[in-house]
Image (cartoon, grey):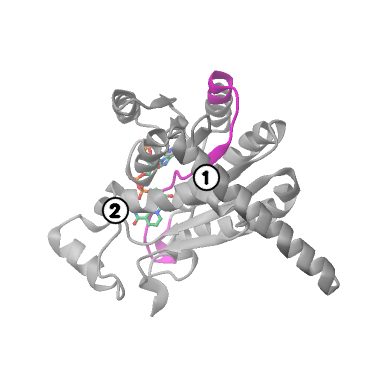
Amino acid sequence: MNRRDFVSKTVSASVITSVASQKKSDDSQTNRKRFEDKVVIITGATSGIGKAAAFAFAKEGAKVGFCGRRENLGQQVQEDIKNQGGEATYIKADVIKADELKIFIDSIVNKYKRLDIAFNNAGTVMFRNLHEIEIEEWDNMFNTNTRGVFLAMKYQIPHMLKTGGGSIVITSSMHQVSTRPGGSAYAASKNALMGIARAAAMDYGEKGIRVNLLAPGITDTPMFRNATGGTPEAIERAKSIIDSLKRIATPEEIAEVALFLASDESRYITGTSILADGGMMAG
Ligand SMILES: NC(=O)c1ccc[n+]([C@@H]2O[C@H](COP(=O)([O-])OP(=O)(O)OC[C@H]3O[C@@H](n4cnc5c(N)ncnc54)[C@H](OP(=O)(O)O)[C@@H]3O)[C@@H](O)[C@H]2O)c1
């Protein structure tokens, strides 16, 4: 590219920026919410990070379809979101079961008529020395954390292609970057997600679909509490290994990163991972 082309392209970019800021200010004048008219599907929103994200998306105007296996919790989340003036639909589905996942996704799209955002978040954790891991436990880890994401995307992407694109956010983990003793199955299942995100970003970038990972650090959810016992000592121990912020994340803080990756504010980010670990991996 010669200098003239470069300058003219730079000028066009600044015109686009100014049009974008004009639109942003128009949106704020009309009080338009960030995800107004958007349809979001979340796997694993009966508790923890997924639940926090379901509330946050709904608060920002999205229609939220979500799954999980615990029906009582799912119904409660749906009811609570509706009581707060949001729109949400819970459908019981296990991400290990391809038929249940497909019915869940197709039913949400059938109800809300499109799919803009997918937050593939359902996951399970286990720490055990490798030779002590049962084959069934290894398979369950991969079937949930890795195959479950593949299946969800397999059934979500055709809907996104029909309407010209979307954003897919997948919950990985800081174990994708650096793991702990006993983390072989969990770290391996989460590391595989980077390969999925990178390749899918290339498969669908031109079709308007972005794919990114959200890699949380230690987050105060039932998963964390179950894995550590959730005692005050366990919480203090967790805080003490986060050298930078010296505290564990709230599910709401991690959900905010998911919303950023889902939104147009991250429109130039795809095929990568955002680590939200309070600086734990900085050392
Ligand atoms: N908490 C942390 O410190 C931390 C750190 C890094 C990454 N993560 C990741 O964050 C994600 C969310 O975990 P969380 O911490 O929020 O834990 P959580 O509170 O236990 O939530 C896990 C969610 O996944 C759902 N789920 C699990 N297996 C499922 C299956 N087979 N089918 C459908 N849904 C399933 C659970 O719903 P049901 O049980 O109702 O099915 C629940 O809604 C996971 O992918 C986890 O690996 C968590």
- The structure residue drawn at horizontal position 20% and vertical position 62%, both measured from the top left corner, is 235
User: What crowding class fits label 2: few (fewer than 14 Cα within 10 Å), some (14-19), or many (20 or more)?
Assistant: some
Instruction: Please state the horizontal and vertical placement of residue 91, each as a whole percent of the image.
Output: 44, 25
Tag on residue 135? none
User: Quick check: 163 left or right of 239?
Assistant: right
Q: Mark 1 and 2 residues: CB-CB less than 8 Å, in contact?
A: no
Which residue is the site of mark 2? 250
Q: Secondary structure at mark 1?
A: helix
Image depth: mark 1 or mark 2 in front: 1
Q: At numbered mark 2, what does the secondary structure look like: helix, strand or loop?
A: loop
Residue displayed at 13% across by 60% down? 232
On the image, the x and y values in percent for residue 162 come to 71, 31
| Depth order, front residue of 147/207 | 207
- The residue under label 1 is 24
Dot 1 alpha-carbon crowd within 10 angstroms: few under 14, some 14 to 19, many 20 or more: some
Q: Residue furthest bottom?
A: 283
**Which residues make up the magenta segment?**
108-133
Q: In terms of image quadrants, where is residue 149?
A: top right
Q: Is residue 60 visible?
A: yes
Q: Amino acid at mark 2?
A: Thr
Q: Is residue 125 magenta?
A: yes
Q: CA distance from mark 1 to mark 2?
A: 29 Å
Q: Is residue 36 above or below residue 186?
A: above
Quadrant into which the N terminus falls = bottom right
> Quick one: 227 or 219, which is closer to the camera?
219
Instruction: Tell me, yes or no, if residue 141 can be seen here.
Output: no
Tell me which residue sits at (29%, 49%) in the image: 221
Is residue 30 a member of the stretch shown in magenta?
no
